[in-house]
Image (cartoon, rainbow, N blue to C red):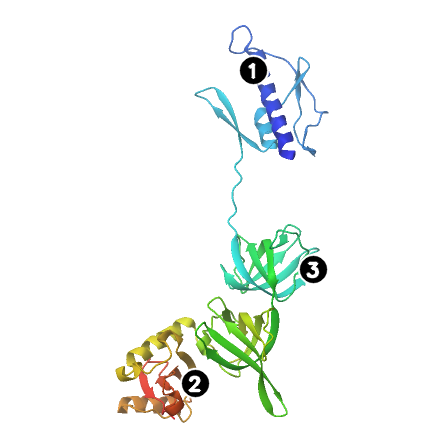
């Protein structure tokens, strides 16, 4: 309705301009002199908003300056000198390219500014970990398009967020939320991992509890390709690098099977342990190095794929290696004398039950292959 009113005003203004031109043409058919009265006391408003326009009355009719009037109405006026034509065109609204992110709310709290909230968001998309500001201009809705209140958002809420296009250069990145769509709720659990196991469909992360000195599994979380795993500093963590004893925060469910222990889908996992995690590029590098140094007669026994091999930093301690040359033994002794670190790459085999997995050891400084650990 608002747009229709604006269009009628534009047509009226154009009509007045046309009448003015005809009156000005006079007997010569080109130009003529007219006189009018400028009324500063008359205010022109557009859709209820006052403007700085004042009309000129000529022969009892009100006339407005074409360019200024077009601007106030949201149009652009151009003068075509070749065709002697005044062209009034609507302004094309510039499309804003917002960034998108699917994720889960880690924390939400009000800011010092009235009506504004700070949302910490973890997820997938243009950014992995973001701080978004929500205010009265942010569109909040559920998956069916029904408007919701900011009070409906809480830690564990899964959302799709549109934000930006400007992101503050900080860690975490910060931006203004344009739109938030709620996709569901996740349960949140902070605990220590009992075990991590590879499955045909992904990974299983198990949590347990100890009662009367006996440890049992309390819940199993199934992870797939869509499950995000990062450290509290935002660094990606391969599932192969997770291990028993790691302290994590899991976002999962809310659907759980009625089995014992219950099973639920895992959405996100934040590794909170102080143990340093290797960068993804470093992990991939050692997986490649280990594959090149893997004896050919052992590859047929491997049950772990190259890209799933467990890569981690370990203390050199009293580690002894097998199949080592004199140069390799010497380098290992130098690292141990300095209480240095080593890189271990572990592959499971079809002989695990009998003699254990294959653990390959590397020097993190020179990338030298130092040998393999004794298999049990």
Q: Are marks 3 and 1 in contact (CB under 8 Å)?
A: no
**Which residue does the numbered mark 3 point to in the structure image?**
151
Label 2 Cα neighbours within 10 Å, binned few <14 / some 14-19 / many ≥20: few
Left or right: 113 with respect to 231?
right
Please report whichever mark, 2 or 3, sits nearer to the chain's N-terminal start.
3
Residue at point 58%, 24% (across, down): 66
**Which residue does the numbered mark 1 point to in the structure image?**
21
Residue at point 47%, 79% (across, down): 197
Left or right: 28 with respect to 117?
left
Please report whichever mark, 2 or 1, sits nearer to the chain's N-terminal start.
1
Label 1 Cα neighbours within 10 Å, binned few <14 / some 14-19 / many ≥20: some
**Image position of 339 with respect to 270: above or below:** below
Q: How many callouts does the rendering have?
A: 3
Q: Are marks 2 and 1 in contact (CB under 8 Å)?
A: no
Where on the picture, by quarter, is residue 19?
A: top right
Q: Nearer the viewer, residue 2 or 273?
A: 2
The picture places residue 182, in percent across and down from the top left corner, at 61, 58
Quadrant (top left/top right/bottom left/bottom right) for the N terminus = top right
Q: Nearer the viewer, residue 157 or 145?
A: 145
Where on the picture, by quarter, is residue 142?
A: bottom right
**Image position of 107 with respect to 46: above or below:** below
The picture places residue 24, in percent across and down from the top left corner, at 57, 12
Point out which mark residue 314 bears. 2
């Amino acid at each position: 309705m608002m747009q229709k009113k604006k269009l009628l005003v534009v047509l009226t203004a154009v009509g007045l301009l046309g009448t003015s031109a005809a009156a000005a043409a006079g007997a010569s058919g080109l130009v003529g002199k007219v006189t009018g009265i400028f009324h500063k006391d008359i205010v022109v408003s557009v859709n209820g908003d006052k403007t700085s326009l004042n009309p000129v009355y000529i022969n009892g009719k009100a006339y407005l300056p074409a360019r200024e009037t077009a601007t106030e109405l949201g149009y652009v006026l151009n003068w075509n000198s070749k065709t002697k034509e005044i062209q009034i065109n609507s302004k094309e609204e510039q499309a804003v390219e917002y960034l998108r992110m699917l994720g889960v709310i880690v924390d939400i709290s009000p800011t010092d500014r009235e009506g504004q909230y700070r949302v910490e968001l973890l997820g997938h998309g243009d950014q992995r970990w973001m701080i978004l500001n929500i205010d009265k201009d942010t569109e909040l809705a559920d998956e069916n398009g029904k408007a919701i209140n900011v009070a409906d958002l809480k830690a564990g809420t899964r959302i799709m967020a549109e934000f930006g296009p400007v992101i503050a250069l900080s860690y975490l990145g910060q931006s203004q939320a344009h739109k938030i769509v709620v996709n569901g709720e996740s349960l949140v659990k902070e605990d220590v991992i009992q075990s991590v196991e590879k499955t045909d469909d992904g990974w299983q992360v198990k949590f347990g509890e100890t009662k009367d000195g006996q440890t049992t599994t309390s819940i199993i979380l199934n992870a797939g390709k869509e499950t995000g795993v990062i450290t509290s500093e935002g660094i990606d963590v391969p599932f192969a690098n997770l291990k028993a004893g790691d302290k994590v925060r899991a976002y999962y469910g809310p659907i759980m099977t009625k089995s014992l222990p219950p099973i639920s889908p895992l959405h996100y996992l934040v590794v909170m342990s102080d143990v340093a995690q290797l960068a993804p590029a470093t992990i991939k590098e050692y997986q490649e190095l280990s594959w090149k140094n893997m004896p050919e007669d052992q590859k047929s026994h491997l049950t772990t794929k190259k890209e799933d091999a467990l890569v981690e930093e370990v203390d050199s301690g009293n580690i002894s290696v097998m199949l080592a040359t004199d140069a390799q033994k010497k380098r290992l002794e130098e690292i141990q004398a300095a209480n240095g670190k080593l890189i271990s790459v572990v592959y499971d085999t079809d002989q695990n039950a009998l003699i254990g997995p294959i653990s390959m050891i590397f020097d993190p400084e020179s990338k030298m292959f130092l040998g393999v650990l004794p298999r049990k």
